[in-house]
Image (tube, grey):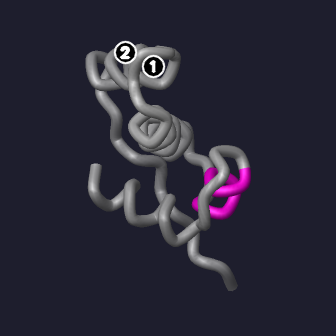
Amino acid sequence: MPRMTPPLAVSPPERLILETVAASEQIPESVRKRARVVLMAGNGAKNCTIGLEVGMHRSRAHFWRRRF
């Protein structure tokens, strides 16, 4: 049976900052991807889904989820 990864706890002020970073054109793409990973993890998405959506390997999505 696959393990379920619980949604990442992202507070409303953190979510606002992450959404701003993810939408900014002036911030490097790598930082915007990290923000998207955390936002998707906060919404309960699985690492493999995040990886496909953002364009990175699922292990990298897992890394940024843990790092946050």
Badge 1 marks a residue whose secondary structure is helix
Residue at left offset 58%, top offset 76%: 3
Identify the residue under disc 1: 19
What's the CA distance linking mark 1 and mark 2? Answer: 5 Å
Among all residues in the image, which is located at the extreme bottom? 1
Q: Is the residue under label 2 in contact with that under label 1 (CB below 8 Å)? A: yes
At x 39%, y 37%, the residue is: 31
Q: Is residue 49 above or below residue 32?
A: below
Give the image location of residue 53, x and y in percent.
Answer: 71, 46
Give the magenta-colored segment's residue range.
Answer: 47-52
Label 2 neighbour load within 10 Å: few <14, some 14-19, many 20+: few
User: Is 25 or 21 nearer to us in this picture?
Assistant: 25
Residue 16 seen in render: yes
Mark number, residue 16 = 2
- Which residue lies at the image location 63% right of the left edge and 51% below the top edge? 50
Q: Residue 14 colored magenta? A: no
**Residue 15 versus residue 55: which sits nearer the camera?**
55
Q: Main secondary structure of the magenta part?
A: helix
Please, is residue 55 above or below residue 3 in the view? above
Image x and y of residue 16, in percent: 37, 15
